[in-house]
Image (cartoon, helix red, strand yellow):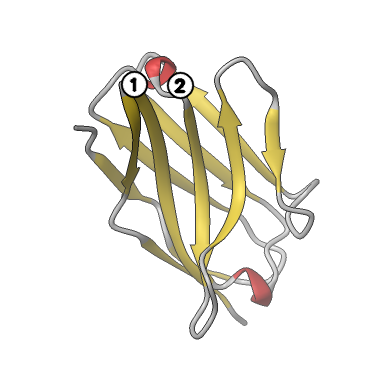
Amino acid sequence: QVQLVESGGGLAQPGGSLRLSCKMSRNIFTLNKVGWYRQAPGQQRDLVASISSGDAANYADAVKGRFTILRDGTDNALYLQMNSLKPEDTAVYYCYAELQIAQTWHYWGQGTQVTVSS
């Protein structure tokens, strides 16, 4: 079992920045994959950014060059630094973790609202 607790969402103006945090109850480097997804109203949940063990970070085309995903082994935390925010970034953002022990387990955070508006 892995608990994920998110924080850092809120309201930002276009062009502004926000930083999302996700604290995990397990050593983050023992997880097969960690990442961030987002879901806008009436839309499906889509990948924003992810890191798989041994691999470089992977980003959705819509956020490349603006968002950065970071892992912190000291705090077992995952971060999403979001710069140059656009109104279309408005969504509920979910932290995600994948653990492989005998089978693949999937865990989600509770979600945090990000609203980009002037």
Query: Can you see residue 18?
Result: yes
Against 89, is 5 above or below? above
The reply to whether callout 2 and callout 1 are in contact (CB within 8 Å) is yes
Visible residue check, residue 11: no
Front one among 102 and 84? 102
Residue 65 shown left or right of residue 113 in the figure = right
| Residue 37 as seen in the image, left or right of residue 89 | left
Element type at marker 1?
A: loop
* Residue behind mark 1: 75
Q: Please, what secondary structure does the residue beneath circle 2 have?
A: strand
Question: Which residue is drawn at the image coordinates 45% and 33% (left, top)?
Answer: 78
The quadrant holding residue 54 is top right
Label 2 amino acid? Asp
Q: Which residue is drawn at 41% across and 44% down?
A: 96
Who's the residue at 72% across and 64% down the image? 15
Q: Quadrant of the N terminus?
A: top left
Residue 73 image position (x, y, % from top left): 41, 15
